[in-house]
Image (cartoon, rainbow, N blue to C red):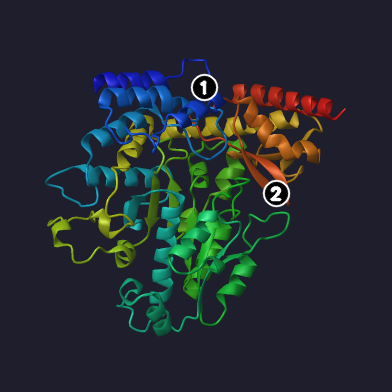
């Protein structure tokens, strides 16, 4: 196994000063596809043995993988590269393969490490003391986290209206509980919520149609119209969950403008027995930026998020731990337990009194990896200052990309509009832009990715195609980003003009 680990590291290594391709070579991708087992062959499912299989993985499959983890220019998704210490921790996770679903303090330290990691995150993000967030756990990511948030919100807003509040929705079922509470509808009020919010609403029985967009204006659709929220909260026989995007997936902008907005929402939620859920998958990390004037708008926009009832975070974004790592916080452990309690399984009991609940009673899965260990390792390794520096480097890289786009003259336009993107102060981690020429714009994502120097994802804005750049890797390099984007976009514009002559 030591030789296998060495070969894996050699295949994944990137020499200092070099940049790994963002996408695999088409021929290598085709070769990888052709190497997959052929169901028509007589030796199908005949074992090859460990050595030959490792050769197959490294020689055939690995060359067909993208460069998301190995390139500082893979900007298509808000998914960070894996820090070396996080990779080492994840290897330990596999090597020791702990069952983290049951709190067994006399047998393993695993659940206590998880709790330590969650506590460190609360402190890093300045969300408050652990006692203020009794419900805390790890999950998979955006969908899992938002399912937890909406499920807890559903539990709370219905229970608050049931005369005998001792019966939970988890016990009664959604239909019976709503009848008892006199609720005809549960709505999720948001502004440009992530697609996983609608998916989560479907899973927890609220329905995708329950998600209502309340944009402040056509010019700022990511901003939540709090006056509209107040009107919706006043509807008879309707319970509400307020879902705040921090930040919006296309622009990185925030649904609330700061502390006063959050204070008002908190007052409204308390008055009308609503639940405030913050999807802070990546935006919440702006709270660890250094207190410098250039980051003041970002720090102000994230002020007050700690006033919510539940909050989600994606560790595989800016913590730069391996993919499939989500974190969820809520005020009361009892709320999580009411929804996710795993009854009639005495063999899964820890048998010991503890402030740490068995994770199987507060989350979706009965089986899951020791996801906490890479997060614990990163926070131990980097500390508050290291995380702040890493976040700053990513913001500066995103702003360098924006400047490179501006430097191309009239060929490209930053979105959502020229005025709001004329300076760097509103640029967080996401940069959205398009070509002014509609013809070039229709093929721009393809042209960028074909060059294989940087990778972007396609999006849309105002009904037109747009290019989305999302910087989230610890490998981020502002100077390199400026140079490669400016050179690439200039060449793409020239080549397109020549093709039209």
| Residue 416 visible in the snapshot | no
Q: Are marks 1 and 2 in contact (CB under 8 Å)?
A: no
Disc assigned to residue 461? 2
Placement of the N terminus among the 4 image quadrants: top left
| Residue 185 visible in the snapshot | yes
Q: Residue at x 67, y 56 (%)?
A: 221
Q: Secondary structure at mark 1?
A: loop
- How many badges with numbers are in the image? 2
Q: Position of residue 467 (x, y in %)?
A: 67, 39
Camera-side residue of 461 and 302: 461
Instruction: Classify residue 222 by image quadrant.
Output: bottom right
Q: CA distance from mark 1 to mark 2?
A: 30 Å
Q: Secondary structure at mark 2?
A: strand
Disc assigned to residue 20? 1
Q: Position of residue 404 (x, y in %)?
A: 70, 28
Q: Position of residue 311 (x, y in %)?
A: 44, 55
- Left or right, 348 with respect to 204, comes to left
Q: Position of residue 117 (x, y in %)?
A: 32, 43
Placement of the C terminus among the 4 image quadrants: top right
């Amino acid at each position: 196994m030591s030789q296998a680990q060495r070969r894996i590291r050699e295949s994944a290594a990137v020499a200092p000063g070099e940049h790994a391709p963002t996408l695999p070579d088409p021929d290598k991708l085709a070769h990888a596809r052709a190497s997959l087992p052929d169901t028509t062959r007589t030796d199908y499912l005949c074992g090859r043995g460990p050595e030959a299989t490792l050769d197959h993985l490294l020689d055939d499959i690995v060359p067909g993988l993208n460069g998301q983890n190995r390139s500082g220019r893979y900007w298509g998704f808000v998914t960070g590269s894996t820090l070396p210490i996080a990779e080492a921790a994840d290897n330990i996770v596999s090597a020791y393969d702990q069952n983290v679903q049951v709190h067994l303090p006399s047998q393993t330290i695993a659940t206590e490490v998880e709790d330590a990691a969650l506590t460190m995150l609360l402190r890093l993000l300045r969300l408050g003391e652990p006692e203020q967030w009794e419900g805390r756990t790890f999950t998979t990511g955006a969908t899992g986290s938002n399912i937890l948030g909406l499920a807890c919100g559903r539990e709370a807003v219905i229970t608050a209206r049931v005369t005998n509040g001792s019966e939970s929705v988890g016990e009664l079922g959604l239909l019976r509980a709503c009848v008892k509470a006199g609720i005809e509808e549960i709505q999720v009020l948001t502004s440009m919520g992530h697609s996983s919010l609608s998916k989560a609403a479907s899973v927890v029985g609220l329905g995708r149609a329950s998600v209502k967009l309340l944009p402040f204006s056509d010019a700022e659709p990511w901003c939540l119209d709090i006056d509209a929220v107040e009107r919706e909260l006043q509807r008879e026989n309707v319970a509400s969950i307020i879902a705040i995007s921090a930040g919006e997936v296309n622009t990185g902008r925030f649904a609330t403008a700061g502390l006063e907005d959050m204070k008002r929402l908190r007052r409204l939620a308390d008055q009308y027995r609503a639940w405030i859920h913050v999807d802070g998958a990546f935006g919440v990390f702006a709270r660890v930026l250094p207190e410098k004037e250039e980051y003041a708008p970002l720090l102000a926009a994230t002020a007050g998020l700690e006033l919510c009832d539940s909050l989600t975070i994606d560790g595989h974004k800016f913590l730069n731990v391996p993919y499939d790592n989500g974190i969820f916080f809520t005020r009361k452990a009892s709320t999580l337990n009411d929804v996710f309690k795993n009854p009639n399984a005495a063999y899964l009991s820890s048998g010991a009194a503890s402030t740490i609940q068995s994770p199987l009673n507060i989350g979706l899965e009965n089986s899951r990896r020791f996801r906490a260990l890479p997060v614990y390792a990163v926070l131990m390794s980097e500390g508050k200052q290291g995380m702040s520096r890493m976040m700053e480097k990513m913001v500066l890289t995103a702003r360098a990309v924006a400047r490179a786009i501006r430097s191309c003259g009239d060929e490209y336009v930053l979105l959502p509009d020229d005025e709001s993107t004329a300076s760097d102060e509103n640029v967080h981690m996401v940069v959205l832009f398009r070509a002014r020429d509609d013809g070039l714009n229709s093929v721009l994502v393809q042209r960028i990715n074909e060059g294989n120097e940087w990778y972007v994802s396609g999006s849309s804005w105002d009904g037109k195609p747009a290019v989305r750049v999302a910087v989230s890797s610890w490998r981020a390099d502002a100077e390199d980003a400026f140079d490669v984007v400016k050179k690439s976009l200039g060449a793409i514009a020239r080549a397109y003009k020549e093709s039209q002559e």
